[in-house]
Image (cartoon, rainbow, N blue to C red):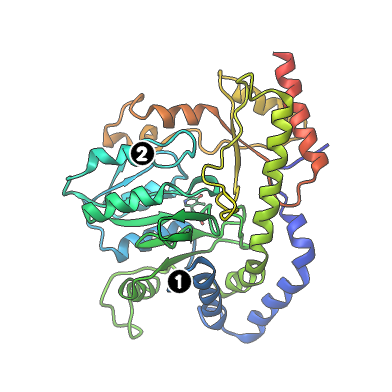
Amino acid sequence: MEVPLLDLKAQLKPLRRAILDAITEVVDSGRYILGPKVEAFERHVAEYVGSNFAVGVSSGTDALLVSFMALGLQPGDRVITTPFSFFATAGAIARLGGVPVFADIDPLSFNLSPEALEEFAGDPNIKAVLPVHLYGQCADMDSILEIAAQERWAVVEDAAQAMGAEYPSTNGVRKAGSMGTLGTFSFFPSKNLGGMGDAGVVVTDDERLYGSLRLLRNHGAEPKYYHEFIGGNFRLDPIQAAVLSIKLPYLDGWHRARRTNAERYQKLFLDSKLPAEGRLIPPVSVRASEEVFLDHIYNQYVVRVPGGLRDSLRSFLSEAGIGTEIYYPVPFHLQKCFRHLGYKEGRFPETEKAAREVLALPIYPELTLEMQEYVVDRIVSFFGKT
Ligand SMILES: *Cc1c(COP(=O)(O)O)cnc(C)c1O
């Protein structure tokens, strides 16, 4: 049996006609830059996420970049973030001359540990904190927002993997991206809400930042050819906006399907005894409750494989036709391009351990029970052999 890590064709099937119609509308409209499709999508996103404003941009990477431009990040400014994320998180800070400062992760959620942030209290060079809601589960935002308020740090949420993830904050249930100063999202095709190319969005409740973002994504021009700031071309393409507007109403249904799949894996793994034997550790949905069902939207379903067996399990599954991935094998502080920051191996033990152990299994909404049973059966068989 073939079980790919992700099957975008299965998702497309029921939506194909509607998406082609929406694209045709853009083609026939002659409006190929910004315009009504982009504005409509921005309204949909703001409403869905629960923020006042949304600005469509060219990618999740550019969403981060333009957010720090809007905050006025200056060369030498320090931004605290996790060393365990997709490269764009740290790259956005460094591309503006900022200095990414890393803090270790919490081993259960894989997200920035609020305790690790404490050591930066009182550091006047820190301008912002950039938590990432990795794999589709929110970082501990209550604690992060509390220390950020004390220290007057801006908070940029990298919610690229978590659009729609819910967080039971002290102010009620909030969605990922809506809690910080700014929240950024990616619509890279493999995210839960995926475009047919690159796309992203930034959300905020701050009207002044909203104004800056709109200018900065369009070379800072207002009116045309008069430049108050140096921006860039970070515009969201209307064809992507049209596609994403068709898909957005299905997002919560896809989340629920992923969630159901995660529960099935959980049961299958418990029955297999592998977790009890310490051979495989399934992911933990740390804040699930009756009122917060979507606290984890499983953009990725990531297990830990301790004991140095992760890579051989991965090859074994690949030979059995099962797609897996490692998000992410090399933490930021050990990347060559950040050597000048001076971090040594061993500095972030939880991050380094996670990088050695994590393995993402197929979790996409259209995955069948039969496929999941096959995946677990193959994993059991791998451990039976070793
Ligand atoms: C995907 C992703 C990004 C970048 O998004 P792109 O749209 O690919 O540029 C940034 N941060 C995280 C955590 C991501 O997963």
Q: Tally the numbered discs.
A: 2
Asked whether, in this view, residue 59 is left or right of residue 341, the answer is: right
Vertical comparison of 167 with 209: above or below: above
Amino acid tagged 2: Cys
Classify mark 2: helix, strand or loop: helix
N-terminal label among 2 and 1 = 1
Tag 2 and tag 1, C-beta contact below 8 Å: no
Q: Position of residue 246 (x, y in %)?
A: 66, 71
* Residue toward you, 80 or 60: 80
* Image mark for residue 267: none
Alpha carbon separation for disc pair 2 and 1: 32 Å
Disc 2: which residue: 337
Give the class, few, some or many, for how many residues have Cα within 10 Å of label 1's Cα (few <14, many ≥20): many
Residue 379 seen in render: yes
Asked whether, in this view, residue 89 is left or right of residue 239, the answer is: left
Q: Position of residue 199 (x, y in %)?
A: 53, 63
Residue at 33%, 79% (x, y): give it: 221
Residue at 60%, 85% (x, y): give it: 30
Disc 1: which residue: 54
Amino acid tagged 1: Ala
* Residue toward you, 361 or 285: 285
* Residue toward you, 15 or 32: 15
Q: Quadrant of residue 216?
A: bottom left
Vertical comparison of 294 with 356: above or below: below
Judged by depth in the image, the label closer to the viewer, 2 or 1, is 1
